Image (cartoon, rainbow, N blue to C red):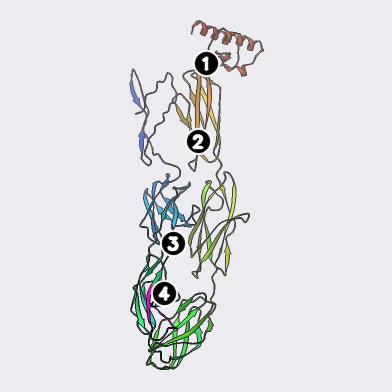
Amino acid sequence: STHPLTKTSPSSFSYTITNLQLGVEYHFRAVASNAAGTVAGDDFTFTPHVILPSVTTLDAANITSHSAILHANLIDLGGDESCKVWFEYGTSTLYGFSTEVREVNESGIVEIEVYDLQPGTVYHFRAVAENSMGKSYGYDMTFETLAVKAKAETNGMEFAVILKGNLTDMGGDDACYVYFEYWEDGGEKQHTAKKVMSSEGEFSEVISGLKENTTYYYRAVVENSQGISYGTNLSFKTISLPSPPSVETMEAVAGQNNATLYANISDMGESNSCYLWFEYWNDKRMATEVIIVNSTGKYGVEIDNLDDGVEYKYRAVAVGSNGRISYGEVKNFTTEAGENHVPEIDIISPENGTVVGVETSLVASVFDADGDLIRVEFFWQNGSKIYEVETYGGIVSVAVKLDYGRNYGWYVNVSDGVAFNKTSLYHFYTMEKVGVNFTHTVIFVNETAYFNASYSGNIVSCIWNFGDGSVAYGRNVSHIYASSGSFIVNLTVVDAYGNKGYIEKEVKVWERGDANMDGVINALDIAMVKRIMEVRDNLSAHPPADANGDGKVDNSDLQIIVNKILGAT
């Protein structure tokens, strides 16, 4: 129960209670007691809620080189039956990316996994919760993805100068560079061209220009985002080189994303068989699988995963069973140009015409049917760029800090390097800064005084503290003071976004008859009443002179003051 209040006349009363639990239903009733007994009012209930959802960002977990699980604690749904929760994340506090959105109907821990992260990188993230009243944000937190060295082992040389290796561990990266280092005994190291591998497995490379009857050492090498790892050192010895096979690069047949490369082995040289493959490139050199041929003739190898509408160079390579190598001339082919789809974009929030807080995020969803890399650019209405990010699709966002009470226009551009798209212009408004004031009538002891609030912003709650232990709720309220004197009245308002504003004023509570308003009733008040009666002063400047409260000052007021001085009732 609350502490008892003493009342000397019928009137309303209130009491502030604190330390309540959010989301818990409470019962209450008023109780009055005097010498004759105790009575209780009807039972009522209330449930404390915050207006916006309340969410806390928690530590990330299960962090790898390319993924992590983000955690948040949804403390309260803000009075709604359900709430949307997601995370914003990126390499700065502008974020740039958003996770999927989860619809939840109860408080508790929310976790969402993020993928396609860069290894050895610090990421910022925060939780976001949204209900019908708006959004709230958790604090910014960070995590760092792992950076693990890759491992490689060197396999034995399979034949002649074709070196083979085995990539056994990607070290958490999506792709690694692999190549070979080789050298003569006591000589300077050389290395083959770097190749990209996106999965564990064997790789090979041909080295040429070797000396006869010479011992060479070699080892496999792999690079990832963390560093370089080496395989075991192995060796081989060349012999006197016999004649190589003869190979001719022939015309290729190209499709949109694939091609078949052809070569003609016209002479096997001094070999019973040979290895045949093709090198091809546009910006980086690649190689086809190696096939074994046992006779002269025309051979073809199909390649895929090519970009459409792009020119590629290629040549045939043949290595005889005796270790001699031959190259065909360099030719080119161009893949067929495919239909390019325009990237799609949809604005998610803020929606047109909505009101948001001064700290919010601009959020959009992007998609490209071709799977192209999309450049996403956020702009204000005047054309100034807010932020840009590159993605293959999904939800993108940028955190912004804005001014109170303004209209903002924004739009988003997307491009896949070929096609361009943009949204229409969207508008939203930021909330008004919370402003508050109040007025009141002249206050007399044991009489009802009226208090009226004025404010700006989307105010949903007004709390009055009258300075005598009493409180009230609402825009316009009344109160009765039991004694005269000075009191500090506090008015606190809360808007729909949880922002608060308050004002404190000193108010004077007068006793009727204190005509000169000095805090005591004596002969000086009689003199003031006479001055007002003689129109040498006015009642509006001295309201307590109206001792009987009838709206005028006359002999009856004078008599009441005399009686108070004499102690008469």
Classed neighbour count for the residue bearing mark 2: other residues with Cα under 10 Å, few (<14), some (14–19), many (≥20): many
| Front-lying residue, 32 or 291 | 291
- Asked whether disc 3 touches disc 2, contact meaning CB atoms under 8 Å apart, the reply is no
Residue at left 56%, top 42%?
Answer: 432
Q: Which element carries disc 3, helix, strand or loop? A: loop
Question: In the rendered picture of this protein, how many numbered marks are placed on residues?
Answer: 4
Q: Nearer the viewer, mark 2 or mark 1?
A: 2
Q: In this picture, which residue range is highlighted in magenta?
A: 202-220
Q: Is residue 394 above or below residue 487?
A: below
Q: Nearer the viewer, mark 4 or mark 1?
A: 4
Q: What residue does disc 4 label?
A: 179
Mark 3–mark 4 contact, CB under 8 Å?
no
Above or below, comparing residue 450 to residue 563 in the picture: below
Mark linked to residue 493: 2
Instruction: Point out the tag, 2 or 1, that comes first from the N-terminus.
Output: 2
Element at label 1: loop
Residue 113, percent across and down? 39, 58
Q: Nearer the viewer, mark 1 or mark 3?
A: 3
On the image, numbered disc 3 is attached to which residue?
118
Residue under pointer 1: 511
